[in-house]
Image: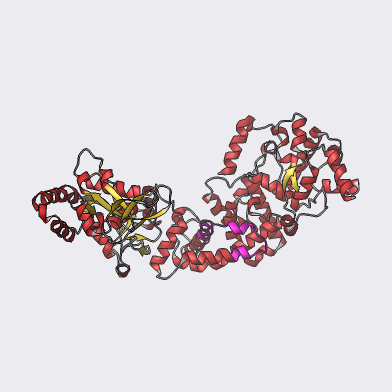
Amino acid sequence: MSRVEFDSTKKPLDDLLKKARDGLLQLPDFQRGWVWDDEGLKGLLASISRSFPVGAIMTLQTGGEVRFKPRLVEGAPNESANVVPESLILDGQQRITSLYQTTMRREVVETSNSKKQRIKRFFYIDMAKALDDSVDRAEAIIGIPENKTETRNFGKEVVRDLSTEEQEYDQCMFPTNRIFDPDTWQMGFYNHWKHDAAAKMDFWFKFQNEILGAFRQYQMPVIQLGNKTSREAVCLVFEKVNTGGKKLDAFELLTAIYAGEKPGFMLRERWAECASRLSGAIALRDHPLTRLQPTEFFQALALLYTLDRRRAVMAAHPATEPPPVTCTRDTVLSIPLAAYENHAARLEEGFKKAGQFLFSQHIYWFKDVPYQSQLVPLAAILAELGDKWEFDAVRSKLAKWYWRGVFGELYGGAIETRFAKDLTEVLAWIEGGPEPTTIKSAAFRAERLDTMTSRLSAAYKGVHALLMREGARDFRSGQPFNQASYFEEAVDIHHIFPRAWCEKAKLTPKQYDTVVNKTPLSYKTNRMIGGDAPSRDLAYLSKQGSVSDDAIDSHLQSHLIDAARLRSDDFDAFITARREALLVLIERAMGGAVYRGEPADELEGEMAVDEWDAVELA
């Protein structure tokens, strides 16, 4: 159960910045880098100088269950890295770092301008403007280049020169990096203006009281999470409050957690090595495993970890309700480092086998994977099966489960519960148990073929792969589509009745743009077909390649195309015949009948397409 304990208070700004300098206040390593531009810095300084609220910061007290790897606030002295921090900043990093950079460090501030160009700036307060109530305070905050000279007209004309302290005193430009330590600068200012000491010291004391006093007296609201707060709660709270920053995934958070638990443990590097091995496991570019995300790997690892945990409880305490198998985000964040080290290697092998399984189903390219998410339970299942997956009966069951999921379109939404059921139920099914829920709940309606127009659709990709798996051959070369020819010939799914012909025939996209009128073809073949009537295109192919009509008809039949109807340019008859042939193909893959009854009300009309596309893109 996630728990949060916190305290809300206010702390002096200079105390917070000094703690950042001394290493007592640091950042968790997963925090993104400091990114504020010079306008943001000037606006922040102006707000503090007027005692305006700039928002609370949230910190986490160290020493509890959550042990993130810490890192210094950007710009803090390197020696402070040896200090064990008291607190870590969860929210407010950009503000604290900006104020630290501009008020505590003597070095130039490396920031960016409105064009995102990297620039270096020293910041000053124009004392006279700051004390003038008619001037916007932001106009009193000035950024000067690293050489402390501001120019225009391509450097030919000097606008402001603050390259020496004497010039700072003379122009009454106070450096912001002296705000919390002004004494030395004050003495220099006094000595510079000693011929007019009375007037200038009155001016100085007014500036000191009104402007510098605002910084010294500023109280920053601080919400501190106690060290008994659970890691799930910390991560959830951080994500909720850090809405403007980079969205963190579970992998980034685990990277910081593991590094905090075991100094020197670099999860990011471990993952990079694993990803490299998986990419190299198949000697083809852009195969499905090349796009595997670390969050997907850890979801599968959570399945294995919680399955082992469940088995251990069942063995030790048979009468006790065992914990569930799960891979929710909270579960992923709770994976102990020891569990990662125990399961990572065999899970990697599980993903390699998943890649081999996809190849056996003629899914070669990452863009052709119907559901990337389905790789999560597939890899976990294969990791558990080990060498047993090589048996034909086991592969057949895996294929049935896989295609049921694809054509049932079951992996497009919130699916962590399905993942957990898949792991336990498919393993039990292979051992002789009942069919898994995914198989029993999957259904494919015949009218779905009439709305499958998007290449993003899982079922659309599934038809593409099944045609190649069933032995579809290229119209021109007669070559089957295997892993070598797929990439060498730039195979993709193309129209059978060309789009140009269909438009001339006054057919609507709803009629000709579905998967029923599409099939895998090589790039060259598709270019040769052009936009004429199929009868003319086929005659052209036969003539160009000196190929008999019978040979081409055989190639067409391998795509479940009725050659006679295609050669007669009978679009309606062709669509009717091929639609039925594709339904039979899907039935064989799913191991069950397709529903051919009346169309469901919720799938009628244009709304049906929109609803399915929403599922496909989820």
The percent position of residue 338, horizontal first and vertical second, equals 46, 68
How are the colours assigned in the image?
Answer: secondary structure
Residue at (57% x, 45% y) in the render:
412
Task: Answer left or right for 21 relative to 282.
Answer: left
Task: Answer left or right for 240 relative to 46.
Answer: right
Residue 167 magenta: no
Q: What secondary structure prevails in the magenta region? A: helix
Q: Point out the residue furthest to the left here.
A: 198
Residue at (23% x, 55% y) in the render:
168
Residue at (60% x, 46% y) in the render:
410
The percent position of residue 17, horizontal first and vertical second, equals 26, 58
Quarter of the image for the N terminus: give it: bottom left
Of residues 515 and 272, the one nearer the viewer is: 272
Task: Answer left or right for 134 relative to 284.
Answer: left
Q: Point out the residue furthest to the front here.
A: 156
Of residues 468 and 188, the one nearer the viewer is: 188
Region of the chain picked out in magenta, as a range: 277-302
| Residue 100 appears in the figure | yes
The percent position of residue 440, horizontal first and vertical second, equals 63, 46
Of residues 410 and 442, the one nearer the viewer is: 410
**Location of residue 30 (image quadrant):** bottom left
Q: Is residue 6 above or below residue 443?
A: below
Of residues 343 and 562, the one nearer the viewer is: 562
The percent position of residue 605, horizontal first and vertical second, equals 64, 29
Q: How many numbered circles does the render carry?
A: 0
Residue at (76% x, 33% y) in the render:
502
Quarter of the image for the C terminus: give it: top right
Q: Is residue 536 above or below residue 365?
A: above
| Residue 223 appears in the figure | no
